[in-house]
Image (cartoon, grey):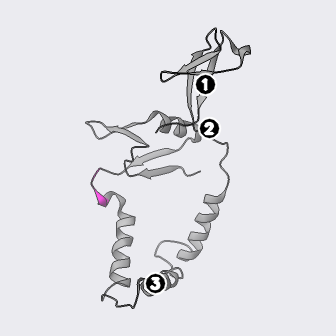
Amino acid sequence: MPKSILYDNTRIVVAGILGDGKRQRTRAYSELQSHYLFEDRFGRAGKGNDKGKVEGLVGYARRNFLVPIPVFESFEALNDHLVACCRRRMGDCLRGHDGTIGERLERDLAALQTPLPAPYDACEKVATTVSSLSLVRYRLNDYSVPTTYGHRDVLYAVTSMRW
């Protein structure tokens, strides 16, 4: 699990941007963050320079792979050219880093493939009471539950959660 994640103010994560620039997180995202214990960071709305590595790599690819403007017979040939350029770049070693770009990518991919410590149950949980007719109400709809739960307090998990 990463220690921190940089977000681009997606609605799934950010319910609103407050006056002081802080983010109001959605309830579901707050639960996920509490479950896996990671820090979040947010880019400023409309500011591409907050994501400098991504923007820098776009510029690098444009300057090094597309200047001068390449001419190809088809998009497939252009894509083959770009793939070949990226594969050559995998052998480069960046200043201040150990190993080549390809070796670092392999390490990152291996880290991303490790199973999460405990699965997160991504559903909305609603505390409610079962009626005498063995029904629970959720968003103006009644749902049937086994009669053994009649008149009990239950935690109802809604799996079709709207983010």
**For residue 104, which quarter of the picture?**
bottom right
Q: Which residue is mark 3?
A: 76
Q: At numbered mark 3, what does the secondary structure look like: helix, strand or loop?
A: helix
**Of the pair 151 and 46, the residue shown nearer to us:** 151
- Please provide percent x and percent y for residue 83: 49, 81
Estimate the spatial distance between the alpha carbons at disc 2 and disc 1, rounded to whole Å.
Answer: 13 Å
**For residue 107, which quarter of the picture?**
bottom right
- Please provide percent x and percent y for residue 125: 57, 27
Is 68 displayed left or right of 36 in the figure? left
Task: Specify the segment rendered in magenta.
Answer: 45-49
Among all residues in the image, which is located at the extreme right? 148
Residue at image position (58%, 64%) is 108
Estimate the spatial distance between the alpha carbons at disc 1 and disc 3, rounded to whole Å.
Answer: 51 Å
The verdict on residue 48 being magenta is yes
Mark 1–mark 3 contact, CB under 8 Å? no
Q: Earlier in the sequence, mark 1 or mark 3?
A: 3
- Please provide percent x and percent y for residue 86: 48, 80
Compared to residue 64, the image places residue 21 above or below, namely above
Q: Mark 1 is on which residue type?
A: Tyr
Q: Mark 2 is on which residue type?
A: Asp
Compared to residue 131, the image places residue 64 above or below, namely below
Residue at image position (46%, 33%) is 27
Q: At numbered mark 2, what does the secondary structure look like: helix, strand or loop?
A: loop
Q: Which residue is mark 1?
A: 156
Q: Mark 3 is on which residue type?
A: Glu
User: For the stretch drawn in magenta, what is the main secondary structure?
Assistant: loop
- Please provide percent x and percent y for residue 131: 61, 11
Q: Which residue is mark 2?
A: 121
